[in-house]
Amino acid sequence: MNAPVPGATAWVVRRAVPNDCEAVAAAEKLLFSDPWSSRAFADLVDRPGVHFLVGMVDDTVAGYAIAYFAADEAELANLAVVPAWHRHGVGRRLLDAVLEAVHRDGAVEIWLEVRESNAAARALYDRAGFTEVGLRRRYYDRPVEDAIVMRRATALR
Ligand SMILES: CC(C)(COP(=O)(O)OP(=O)(O)OC[C@H]1O[C@@H](n2cnc3c(N)ncnc32)[C@H](O)[C@@H]1OP(=O)(O)O)[C@@H](O)C(=O)NCCC(=O)NCCS
């Protein structure tokens, strides 16, 4: 689906399957203060209106992305990369795969929320062409923080 990630012998983005959910939940627990459970991920596998993608490096989960879509709009609900694979292009490749998938399904625009303090994610989204369109005050818990709302057209540039 994508060009190889530097340092990997095999790299692919594919739809998640139930067997991926334990590894995805383990990464989620490492990365977020309010993590989704393995059960929550399993419920999203093959659910209509959801793209749940995993980035596999040498047969292990390096990252994952989840987008919801309805009519001409999509929401990026989750995107994360395991720490060992940060800054190797995995996040960007997952983001591009999500954009392609929701665009194929007819979504014209995609939006997301990101913690105000999350410099890495904001830089990724900014570089990928998202623009800031709003602020949701005290949107997050643990710790309480505002969310920046970002949006872009789904067509790949
Ligand atoms: C945000 C996250 C998904 C980025 O994944 P990644 O695979 O490391 O990102 P990439 O290697 O694809 O980076 C693409 C671009 O994003 C920007 N970027 C990514 N991480 C960055 C960082 N720590 N600091 C500054 N810019 C960063 C850079 O512009 C980078 O391009 P470059 O490496 O050529 O400079 C990852 O840091 C992560 O999983 N964080 C914890 C979970 C999270 O915050 N998810 C987002 C929730 S909204």
Image (tube, grey):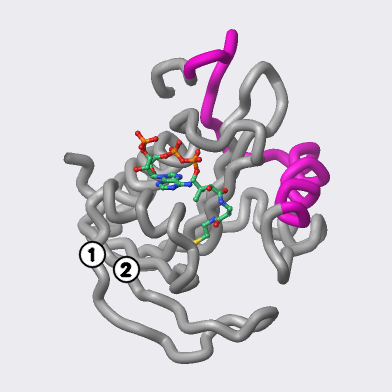
- From the viewer's side, name the closer residue of 36 and 49: 36
Q: CA distance from mark 1 to mark 2?
A: 5 Å
> Which residue position is annotated with label 1?
131
Q: Position of residue 15 (x, y in %)?
A: 58, 38
The response on whether ligand 1 sits within 8 Å of label 1 is no
Q: Position of residue 28 (x, y in %)?
A: 71, 54
Mark 1 near mark 2, Cβ–Cβ under 8 Å? Answer: yes
Whether residue 52 is visible: no
Picture layout, residue 114 above or below residue 48 = below
**Left or right: residue 151 compared with residue 102:** left
Looking at marks 1 and 2 on the same chain, the residue that comes earlier in the sequence is marked by 1
Q: Position of residue 114 (x, y in %)?
A: 46, 68
Q: In terms of image quadrants, where is residue 119?
A: bottom left
Q: Secondary structure at mark 1?
A: strand
**Left or right: residue 26 compared with residue 114:** right
Stretch in magenta: 6-30
- From the viewer's side, name the closer residue of 67 and 64: 64
Q: Which residue appears at 61% of the width and 85% of the height?
A: 144
Picture layout, residue 105 above or below residue 49 = above
Q: Position of residue 148 (x, y in %)?
A: 38, 75
Q: Which residue appears at 66% of the width and 33% of the height?
A: 84
> Which residue position is annotated with label 2?
150
Q: Amino acid at mark 1?
A: Thr
